[in-house]
Image (cartoon, rainbow, N blue to C red):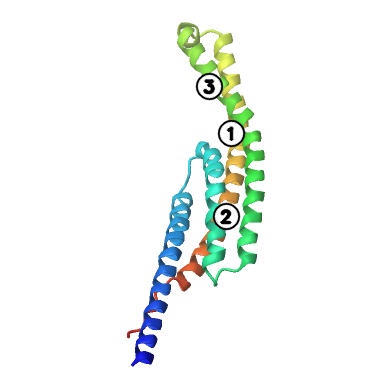
Amino acid sequence: MALSVALTQRKIAANKYNLDLFDKRYEIYEKLYTLHDSNSKSIKFLDYNSSYSNVSYELKYILLRVSLLFENVSKEEISEINDEFEKIETKHKSLLEQRLPIEKDINVRRNSIDDIERNHAAEINSQSYSAKRNEISNHRHCIQQKLPELTNIDDQIKEHHEKLIGKLSRIISSMQKELSVPHKPY
């Protein structure tokens, strides 16, 4: 009789342990999945800066918990993602530093065009030679030359972002394989 009670208590304790472990695993899985899902959608490039600085600490915390709770996810994979994230973050900051002066120049030129069009409409619309029309043309030409640089930087940012998302997808896939509640009936 005592043996039967002890075995039943052991099964109950094992099931409770598995359920508690599932709850902790699911919480971390859900956080990582939400983080992955919110960042895998196309992010406006202006939001990348805040996105990476906010994600960095949260991602590192989640990956630490993943390494402790999930046996399918190796420490090497976690380390690789952390290293990749550091590289991406550094490259991202560098690209943003390159992007800022180009974007600022384009905005200054667009504002100049708007000012000239607003303040010198009569001169611009006349049939004779106009220095202001020539100035607008010059600004538009400079903007057209800067846009490919801006597009190239944006493409590089997007490429690095997609690398990180791909690595997170592999981790999530490994987590899904391990995310179950083994329950043995009494």
Residue denoted by label 1? 147
Vertical arrangement, residue 166 with respect to residue 152, above or below: below
- Residue 109, quarter of the rendered image: top right
Q: Are marks 3 and 2 in contact (CB under 8 Å)?
A: no
Amino acid type shown at disc 3:
Arg
Q: Is residue 30 visible?
A: yes
Q: Is residue 170 left or right of residue 16?
A: right
Where is residue 23 drawn, in percent x and y?
A: 40, 65
Label 3: few (<14), some or many (≥20) within 10 Å?
some
Front residue of this view, candidates 133 and 110: 110
Tell me the SS state at disc 2.
Answer: helix
Mark before the other along the chain sequence, 3 or 1 = 3
Q: Residue at 61% of width from left, 58% of height from top?
A: 81
Tell me the SS state at disc 3.
Answer: helix
Residue denoted by label 3? 110
Residue denoted by label 2? 164
Q: CA distance from mark 3 to mark 1?
A: 12 Å
| Quadrant of the rendering where the N terminus is positioned | bottom left
Q: Residue at 53% of width from left, 60% of height from top?
A: 65
Closer to the eye: label 3 or 2: 2
Front residue of this view, candidates 73 and 141: 73
Name the mark on residue 14. none
The number of numbered badges drawn on the structure is 3
Q: Residue at 41% of width from left, 68% of height from top?
A: 20
Tell me the SS state at disc 1.
Answer: helix
Q: CA distance from mark 2 to mark 1?
A: 26 Å
